[in-house]
Image (cartoon, grey):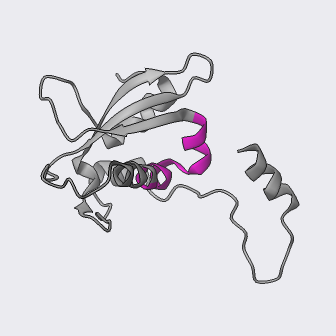
Amino acid sequence: MLFAINLIDIAPTIPNWVFTALVQPKITDQELMSKDVEHYKFEAFDLQLSRVRWLPVDMNRETYKYEFVFHFIGLPYANPEIPYEKYIDYLYIILVDMFGELFVSQHIEMVYYDHLYPNDMDWYSLHQLREFLEEGYLD
């Protein structure tokens, strides 16, 4: 991120051009909670954000960045042709849209995707992720 921030400082001024060094957030928490956010139309499938669940996995004690596992509820498991890396790419697209590129790089170390959705675990809704990242816990 240091390089991106330095790039902002030296970006030239060109009339009628706008330089964006870091992707800014596009989705507010209120939109997530009210379900006003349209679904994502990814190459492999469509996804409603209300169907995304997550769990914290670990936190790096040196950087205070978190690792999370995510699951898309209702996504057919019979999609072995979708590479695992695609799920991770899709997750990062959603996270950057929610928080912006700088916030994601400062708070999230790694994300994982799990096809299975064990009901015996307390999975959280996507709108709760900001609170967790800022507070380190959920009320």
Residue 83: give x, y in percent of width and height: 32, 53
Q: Residue sitting at 42 percent across and 53 percent down?
A: 89
In the rendered image, the quadrant that contains the C terminus is: top left
Horizontal side of residue 106 vs 52, given as left or right: right
Quadrant where the N terminus lies? top right
Q: Nearer the viewer, residue 8 or 31?
A: 8
- Is 88 on the left or on the right of 49, as rendered? right
The number of numbered discs placed on residues in the rendered structure image is 0
Q: Position of residue 105 (x, y in %)?
A: 59, 41
Left or right of residue 18: residue 123: left
State the predominant SS element of the stretch in magenta: helix
Q: Which quadrant would residue 126 be assigned to in this image?
A: top left
Q: Nearer the viewer, residue 117 or 101?
A: 117
Above or below 26: residue 109: above
Residue lying at the far top of the rendered structure: 61
Left or right: residue 73 versus residue 82 is: left
**Residue visible at 19% across and 24% down?**
121
Per the image, is 100 magenta? yes
* Residue 23 in picture, x, y percent from top left: 59, 58
Residue sitting farthest toward the bottom: 16
Image x and y of residue 5, in percent: 77, 50
Q: Nearer the viewer, residue 7 or 83?
A: 83
Would you place residue 90 above or below residue 67 in this image?
A: below
Q: Is residue 66 above or below residue 99?
A: above
Tell me the residue at 14%/29% (across/down).
118
Does 40 appear in magenta? no
> Measuring 30% from the left and 60% from the top, which residue is drawn there?
36
User: Residue 34 or 60: which is nearer the viewer?
Assistant: 60
Please give the range of residues in magenta. 93-106
